Image (spheres, rainbow, N blue to C red):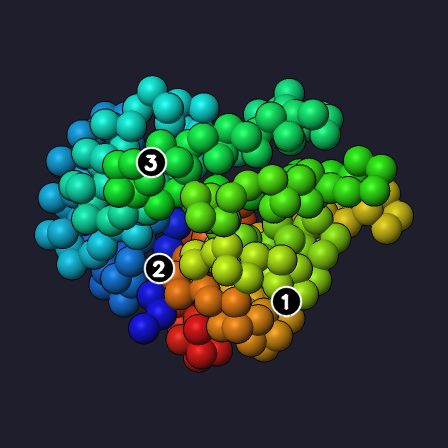
Amino acid sequence: MNRLGIQMYTLRNTMDTRENVFQTLKRVAEMGYRSIQITTPGFMSYEELGKMIRENGLAADSAMIPVYEIPQRLDDAERQAKIFETDVVRTDSISTEQRKSPEGYHEFAAHLNRCGKLLAEHGLKFMYHFHAFEFVNFEHETGMDILLRETDPEYVMFQPDVFWLAAAGKEPSDALKLFRGRARYMHLKDYSIAVGGKGKLEQVDRISSPVGTGNLNWPDIIKTAHEIGITNYVAEDDMGILDPFESAKISLENMKKMGF
């Protein structure tokens, strides 16, 4: 059965205290979400957050460790995953410096393999969430080409994001096919053009928006996602144009209507 969840970064501005974290989780659960993707705030312990998640009838779909810290924090990753009752560790992005060259992507692919193997020794799966910049072109290939080719499918999964695929100049429903057998989770947010954008001619201001309210080809995205094995659909609206609770509500309603 597919899981419809939300990346809690969407609601980051309402989670600045312990009480506000609890109330935000409560509102998310009341909307109908049962799965969340969340990073533990610096003012809370994993145990505190895990208790709040369970009290609100929610489940965390993954643990989070920064990508360059994973080799030094394996016990931390295992403890966090146990508390959140998950076996998946997700992480953040390739560094700005490594993004600049093919050599940086080769080095990063090797690092991802190492992280995935180390986490596997602790019984954990490893997932890398990319954005648009991994599709930078280096002559005849992109950074993403390197990462897909040089990472081991046994140890490194990816979390596609349909907004960032569109931002990279790809048709998401087609580009998702690159991740067949390499992805179980996917971020969902729509791709919209800002009203009154101040860009030069043909340089539009793109913004994220709730699922089903923008310009993405959702019927074909859904079809491809099902075909490649996505089981965790995670709404996210990280640009904060709309009220985040309203955005989260619209996304969930449309995800259900569209058959995710």
Which residue carries the number 3 mark?
119
Which dot marks residue 31? none
Q: Nearer the viewer, mark 3 or mark 2?
A: 3
Q: Residue at x 42, y 32 (%)?
A: 115
Q: Is residue 39 in view from this perspective? A: no
Instruction: Evaluate whether residue 160 shows in this view.
Output: yes
The picture quadrant where one finds residue 43 is: top left
Q: Nearer the viewer, residue 236 or 146?
A: 146
Marks counted in the figure total 3
For badge 1, the amino acid type reads Ser
Whichever of labels 2 and 1 marks the residue nearer the N terminus, that label is 2
Amino acid type at circle 3 is Leu
Q: Which residue is mark 2?
A: 5
Q: Would you identify the image quadrant in which residue 70 lies?
A: top left
10 Å crowding of disc 3: few (<14), some (14-19), many (20+): many
Image position of 77 (left or right of 229): left
Label 3 – label 1 distance at C-alpha: 31 Å
Residue position marked by numbered label 1 in the rendering? 173
Q: Earlier in the sequence, mark 3 or mark 2?
A: 2
Q: Secondary structure at mark 2?
A: strand
Residue shown at 13% from the left, 52% from the top: 54
- Secondary structure under tag 1 reads helix
Callout 2 amino acid: Gly
Residue drawn at x 48%, y 78% as measured from the top left = 258
Residue 54 sits above or below residue 40 on the image: below
How far from the left and from the top, in percent, is residue 37? 34, 48
User: Which one is closest to the eye, mark 3 or mark 1?
Assistant: 3
Tag 3's secondary structure?
A: helix
Residue 103 falls left or right of residue 243 = right
- Identify the image quadrant of the C terminus: bottom left
Q: Nearer the viewer, residue 239 or 219?
A: 219
Quarter of the figure with residue 6? bottom left
